[in-house]
Image (cartoon, helix red, strand yellow):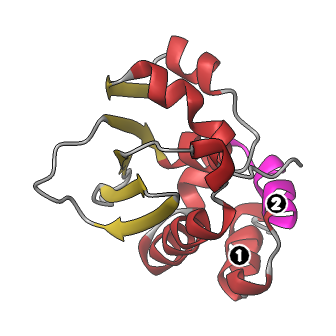
Amino acid sequence: MNDPTHDLKSELASLDFASVSPEEFARIVKRLSPQEIREVMQGELRERVLSEIFGRMERQFRPEAAGTLDSLIRWKVAGTDGEGDAVYETRIKDGGCTVTEGRSETESRVTLIMGDAEFMKLVSGNGNPVTMFLTRKLKLVGDVGLAAGLPKYFDIPKA
């Protein structure tokens, strides 16, 4: 019997994420249901995908849009099926953007909390952050205004 999730997982596992454009990534995510994303986002593949996404944030940052913004944004991607939570921090300061893995002692201006599927849909331009917030698939702690403005600070792909 042919298992489409296994085929998809194999396809994603063999991808060289560094060579996949943001637009291609958005198209891949658009094809996936939330359940398929949860099934794929496990183990080493989850770590690779998250690392690549957060690594691209620095390159997709739009300093002209951020101006003099000085903020720490914390991302908590809640794991499922025994996967632990992944925490990354995005520091926007002095016209630059740096991303670090893990939680620092610095107070964040906003923390965004969501599951793997919601995170993948959000960063690939396939999810509406307002709808996700209203349906409680995206939780915010802190400055809601900053969270609402985040999309303008990054070149978010369109599928």
Check disc 2 and report the residue beneath it: 28
Where does residue 56 sit, x and y in percent of width and height? 62, 69
Q: Which residue sits furthest top?
A: 134
| Lateral position of residue 144 relative to residue 18, left or right | left
Q: Is mark 2 in CB contact (under 8 Å) with mark 1?
A: yes
Residue at image position (72%, 50%) is 124
Read off the magenta span: 23-33
Residue 100: mark in rendering: none
- The quarter in which the N terminus is drawn is bottom right
| Lateral position of residue 111 relative to residue 24, left or right | left
Residue type highlighted by circle 2:
Ile
Up the image or down, 2 lies above or below 15; here it is: above
Check disc 1 and report the residue beneath it: 12
Q: How many marks?
A: 2
Up the image or down, 41 lies above or below 36; here it is: below
Where does residue 76 sit, x and y in percent of width and height? 34, 47
Where does residue 153 sit, x and y in percent of width and height? 63, 45
- Of callouts 2 and 1, the N-terminal one: 1
**What is the magenta segment's predominant secondary structure?**
helix
Q: Which residue sits furthest left?
A: 105
